Amino acid sequence: MSTKLKMLLAGTAMAAASASSATELEVTHWWTSGGEAVAVSKFAEAWNATGNTWVDGAIAGSGGTARPIIISRILGGDPMAATQLNHGRQAEELIEAGLMLDLTDVAEAGGWADVVNPSSLLEGCTQDGRIYCVPVNIHSGQWLWLSHDAFEKAGIEVPSDWNAFVAAGAKLQDAGLVPLAMGQQGWQQNLAFNAIAIAVAGADDYLEVVSNKNDDVVRGPSYTAVFEAMANARELASESNVQDWNQATNMVITGAAGGQLMGDWAQGEFSVAEKLEGTDYSCLPGLGLNQILDTGGDAFYFPLIDDPEITAAQKELAALLISPEVQVSFNLAKGSLPVRGDIDMSTANGCMQKGLQILADGGVLPTVDQSFTADTQTQVEDLMAEFWSGDMEASVAQDRYADLVASAD
């Protein structure tokens, strides 16, 4: 049976199921900032349009706050119908415990293997040859966001890369501005670390560390340069006293800060604020040093629920989230790249077009979520939080990170 015929039959069956039995599904996620709320509403609107009902289970805070709550509910026998997680190893133990719905039949009917690009996204949803999640976007963390207003106040040109940004720090400070906006949370500081590592150490050494757990590379000269760059970043962010990432983004939007190291989801905040790329702000993928992005992102998993009607609706929702129309509307609002390689994103803004071009050129790397366990990630985030909040020497942080890499499973 051809892929197109499978998709047609699957769509017909799902439409019939929707018409005959409208179902409420509780969906948990941690998308609560202004831009994120607009984006997730695209999913809810599409689901409600089928005659079913999206029961929004937003959990305030970051993924680090939400994931323990999500996992606790599933383990405690009070599962939601669907939940956001990052594709990779976060749901590994839940799948091994037999608590997550197998979506392989939905993926095969929808021809996901033919349209998901890069294929590593679907591999991140696959365990023991079975597919347990639907990837919905590609998010990369290697972006430097720059406020045109801030650099105008400082009387200097908008930098073209990370090195020029660091050199501009003193003049931004002299103008009474915070050079680098940074939220005081370990995951944000870890994201900045990985962005700097890819830009400064380069893709090959980054892969050796993240994918091959090579602690010798961490102890070598390229990562010495990374941790020295981290010390520079810490100094530039010393007056940034906000907590949440979107608060730091707002500092850039309002011109209170020169820049921010943050993932491409920051675009949603600029969009809500009606700021224009190239006029009000600039975005530098790979920090302007290295045109390479990691391919992290979000996926939806569906806990097992002993109710055939719920199970059918879960599979219908999974298919809907990756459908072409929903992929376009959601990702344009979110600022992320779509997981489908067969849809038209010509209306995307300049930042998204940069990301799409890097994706088309093959300049992508796996995310740490696909390589490190959640436990290792937490330990690294704790280290980064300690480093950013104190005066730890760069060499000490480098040694401690090397030890974590050496012990990572």
Image (cartoon, rainbow, N blue to C red):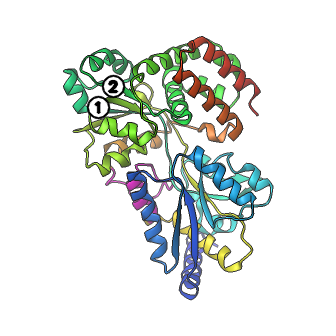
Residue 284 magenta: no
Are the two marked residues, 2 and 1, in contact with CB atoms closer than 8 angstroms?
yes
Question: Which residue is tagged 1?
Answer: 256
Q: Is residue 378 above or below residue 274?
A: above
Amino acid type of the residue that numbered disc 2 sits on in the rendered structure: Val
Which structural element holds mark 2?
strand
Please report the residue visible at 37 percent of the width from the left and 49 percent of the height from the top.
268
Task: Specify the segment rendered in magenta.
Answer: 326-348
Q: CA distance from mark 2 to mark 1?
A: 6 Å
> Residue farthest to the bottom?
20
The mark tally for this picture is 2
Front-most of residues 201 and 74: 74
Quadrant in which the N terminus appears: bottom right
Please report the residue visible at 54 percent of the width from the left and 19 percent of the height from the top.
390
Quadrant in which the C terminus appears: top right
Count neighbours of disc 2 (C-alpha within 10 A) and say few if under 14, some if 14 to 19, many if 20 or more: many
Front-most of residues 236 and 147: 236
Which label number is shown at residue 178?
A: 2
Please report the residue visible at 39 percent of the width from the left and 40 percent of the height from the top.
247
Which label number is shown at residue 214?
A: none
Please report the residue visible at 49 percent of the width from the left and 40 percent of the height from the top.
140
